[in-house]
Amino acid sequence: MFKRSALAAALLAGTMGVATAQDLKVGVASEATSVDPHFHNVGQNNALRRHIFESLVSADENQKPQPGLAASWRNVDDTTWEFKLRPGVKFSNGKDFTVRDVIYSVCRIPLVENSPSNFTIATKGIEDIQTPDPQTLIIKTKGPYPLLPIEFSVFGIISADAFGAGPDLKFGKSGCTGVGTPPKSADFNDPAKAIGTGPYKLKEYTRGTQLVLERNDNYWGNKPAWKTVTFRPITSPGPRVAALLAGDVDMIENPPIQDFDQIKKGGFNVVQGLSNRIIYIHLDQFKGADWKTPGVKGTDKNPFLDKRVREAMSKAINRDAIVERIMGGVAVPAGELLPVPLFGTSPDRKPDRYDPEAAKKLLAEAGYPNGFELVLGSPNDRYINDEKVAQAVAQMLTRIGIKTTVDSMTASTFFSRRNKYDFSAYLAGWGADTGEMSNSLAALVTTQNYAPGFGNTNRGRYSNAKVDELTAKALGTIDDKAREKLLQEASKEAMQDYGIIPLHFEVTPWAFKKTLTYKPRVDQYTLAFEVQPAK
């Protein structure tokens, strides 16, 4: 009797172990602002959407392009790309994936309402789409467009039929036909409408509490190791580490460096890698007579239009101290918008040297010997130690006479306010989806509306004709060496003009149970389908 009971208990324990092994619980540092794959081009949203809504082109942990929903692609001529879709792919509702779905997704992107940072940056080069058969896409561009394949890794594909596209669906540069009534972003919060081709499908979304995914049995590729994945937003580092140590979650993002030893002693692993994410300061450089000064006092004009003020602010910031004291060494001081050796970066471009005396002199030369007052906007739950970094920057600016206070808030509130130009100065971050300098330049420092997709996240309203021209020329240059030189020149111009103030690149850590493995990603994404059981 005892032996049978012991055997039954062992079998029960084994069964429970198998069931538990099918579930993965992840504590994330920042919650996605929407399930809609086209709503907000920001890291946490982009990571989530890759579980549900795939792209034509995938990207590995080093952002190198890989086949995705497109099995192959080729450059037919300077202005023509051919994509062959992967056969046999189905959406999570069992419907076939075809060229219609790609066209519908491209058409829907510019129609998304109230997007804080949209995806037209990834579709701007498309002039026409031709479909000789259900599995072939012919993409026409106005001029040579070398980044088209990698930019097709940036946005997710949604189902045309699921959202009522008509039989006459057709791409048009100035407006598509047959789109019908495109879905609202809130529609995707409903699992019945969040229909994609990815390895997972949405099971439950409770904003602020958890998001649950379940394995997509219709998935065309390798089945992920986990039947269900639960993402829990735990924005404070201390509670996030405590949840890992207590076993409430199996894996966490961004554990603080000061807790690494405790985590390792608790029987967990820590991995880390340099990311493509730049933390920066944007200054509102709007030139209009109706410029408003939210948070700026002590002057009746826009001080940030003077390059000397911008340069003074950059030289007032001790990047080495921020990296050492605030980031605990888990960051790299930045002199431009991407780290070496990513494409378009310059090895000789160094961060500004900390020089408060030179900063004071520049302020006086600009007509602000007594400085002015400033409120610096910042999220407090989006980037690693974001509020602490903002406070440190505020103290450093105050020391040169720019009396600075910090207005910090949750990421969702911050991005909404930033989009309304509520800040004359703010701290934020940007990760280059393409892993190439053109992405960062086009999003952050090119003139708004200079070209389709340019300046989408340039909430500093910086404008420099030379930067615009060099970036646009690079995006039309097929030859890699020539394109890289153009990007280096554009970056140098923007940095020397202090169009934006780079602070540091994040080094991203993850911590997890020793029964798991995960490769650090340059894009900082936590992808559950890449988490594997340890061998």
Image (cartoon, helix red, strand yellow):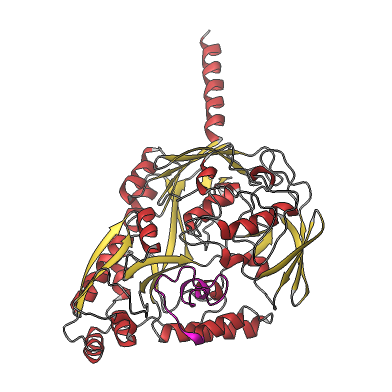
User: Residue 524: x percent and y percent?
Assistant: 49, 59
Residue 359, x across and y down, in percent: 25, 85
Task: Give the main secondary structure of the magenta stretch.
Answer: loop
- For the point 74% across and 75% down, the residue is 79
> Which of the pair 512/137 is nearer the observer?
137
Location of residue 72 by image quarter: bottom right
Q: Viewed as shown, does residue 481 lie left or right of 491? A: right
Residue 4 screen position, x and y as percent: 56, 12
Asked if residue 276 is among those painted magenta in the image, a careful observer would answer no
* Span of residues in magenta: 441-466
Question: Is 208 left or right of 72, judged from the image as shown?
Answer: left
> Vertical placement of 294 versus 225: above or below?
below
**How many numbered tags mark residues here?**
0
- Image quadrant occupied by the C terminus: top right
Q: Position of residue 283 (x, y in %)?
A: 35, 75
Compare residues 154 and 524 and report the one nearer the observer.
154
Q: Is residue 159 left or right of residue 96?
A: left
**Residue drawn at the location 23% of the way across and 80% of the way down:** 300
Vertical placement of residue 274 versus 13, above or below = below
Residue situated in front as seen by the camera: 302 or 146: 302
Outermost bottom residue: 365
Q: Residue furthest top?
A: 1
